[in-house]
Image (cartoon, rainbow, N blue to C red):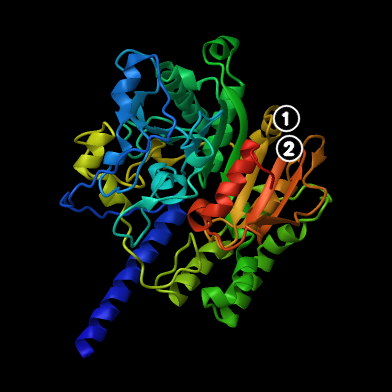
Amino acid sequence: MLALKSLQLLFVLYASAVSASRSREAVDRLRGTKHNIVEDTEPLQHAKRSASFFTPTFANPKAATFAVNSSALPLVTFPLQNSWAGRLPISATSGETRQLFFWYWPSSQPTASKTLTIWLNGGPGCSSLAGFLQENGPVSFQPGAKAPVSNPNAWTTASDVLWIEQPVGTGFTLGTPNIQNESQLATQFYGFLQQFFGVFTELTSKQLFITGESYAGFYIPYIASRIINASAAEKAALPLSLQGLLINDGVYSSDIVGEQAPTAGFAKSFQSTLGLSTSTVNSLASKSSSCGYDAMISQITYPPKGKINLPNGNKDTISRSCDVFDTYLDDAEDANACFNIYRITDKCPTPNDPIESYFSRSDVQKLLHVSGFGTWSECSNRNVFVNGLDNSAYSETLFPNLLANLPRGMTLWHGLIDSILFNIGDRLTIQNLTWGGLQGFQTAPSTPLIVGGTQAGIFHTERNLTYIEVNNAGHMIPEDQSAVALHVFQAILGQTTL
């Protein structure tokens, strides 16, 4: 019995170390890195493809070189439609060595979809295949599971979906990262789209939506702006019909807005869940008040009463004594050995995550046309921006023009138990933003979001911008609340209403 307790203690200590390490890496670069590789020893079980799936055809013979027999994916025992995957360069320049990886899935509906949706994970440097395998793809392989299962709430039930690993340096991509800002990232991404649609030309006519989460809150507005602001010649050659954007738990503005200012209030609201003492909560509150964060939060009114300034002379810098967020993180990790910054309700033990082992398998890589890649990492262990610095203006500065030009606007949504970025930061961003002739929302979000007869959150829409808060969801909403996420996605596409 003593030996068993010792083993249990060792497991908890190990889980604690892993959890703390992941939280720190996530805060440093809004990401987490895992390395779990296993030998390819499981027997292959190929499911039969269902004849009810619609299968697109492509005139360019090069498309056939990217074809994937999806039902042959290792451990998959359920029918899947064919898909297309591989790498394409970021430009038409001869000898271009930088290539992005994509995995295109047509809708699982029996007829052709009218829409094409791009999904991007964040990081920076984290793979969109995490979104595919654990959030909104047709195959779901969750932590602790022994094999993947079919995802009934896959976004492919509503649209064609294109998961893209980017920027260069992420996942299966090839080449040396050389970007210094989001404008350069968007230019490389647009170059990739030119190559992609050159092969899969028939997809160009579909209505295009761009979706993603976390640091994609920077990626997506810059990419969308690059598409909207393309030259006349570029638009003639690639006539994309960009309709709208959907971003959850995104980075749009300063660290003060997204993390520091909301921290103390979040700690108080979730004190019991976090296991924090009253003295800890009071200490965070005292620091938040003295550093000017509470004054910021108090200015969230509907309608706004004026511009909301950052502390420290409106500079996005803080002193160590005003780093409330890191103090909170230390306290949360002390209270919960398996604290998960992405979803604060997690407790020990931490289940093993199969994603890196799966995409590191040689048989998987062969199917995806990236044979011999070797060890695949969910998040890059090298800088995807030169020196690890993204020298870009906050993406919120692009919102007014995007809202004026996107037919279906922008939707920002946030999981309420996310702890790496807080929903109050989204509210601060929105209420400090001027678009469509007014600052912020004029009415506070309060409309119930009803899914399956149950309230799943609240939402509000004004002047082409929709904001949603989702109950019982962390940083990865489609993973935590898949039915709710599919409902929201369908509403964005215009297939239903919120």
Q: Amino acid at mark 1?
A: Ala
How many residues crowd around disc 2 within 10 Å: few (fewer than 14), some, or many (20 or more)?
some
Q: Nearer the observer, disc 2 or disc 1?
A: 2
Residue 434 left/right relative to 170: right
> In the image, residue 312 lies at what x, y percent?
66, 53
Residue 35 left/right relative to 250: left
> In the image, residue 469 lies at what x, y percent?
65, 55
Quarter location, residue 32: bottom left
Residue 101 left/right relative to 221: left
On screen, 290 above or below 318? below
**Which residue does the image show at 25% across and 33% down from the upper left?**
370
Per the image, label 2 sits on a secondary structure element best described as: loop
Residue 413 visible in the picture: yes
**Which residue does the image show at 35% across and 20% down from the upper left?**
63
- Whichever of labels 2 and 1 marks the residue nearer the N terminus, that label is 1
Tell me if label 2 and label 1 are in contact, CB under 8 Å.
Answer: yes
Q: CA distance from mark 2 to mark 1?
A: 8 Å
Residue 392 visible in the picture: no
Q: Which residue is mark 1?
A: 404
On screen, 285 above or below 24? below
Q: Amino acid at mark 2?
A: Asn
On screen, 312 above or below 343? above
The disc label shown at residue 464, or none = 2
Q: Nearer the viewer, residue 441 or 132?
A: 132
> In the image, residue 424 lies at what x, y percent?
66, 57
Q: Nearer the viewer, residue 62 or 120?
A: 62
Per the image, label 1 sits on a secondary structure element best described as: helix
**Which residue does the image show at 26% across and 40% down from the upper left?**
72
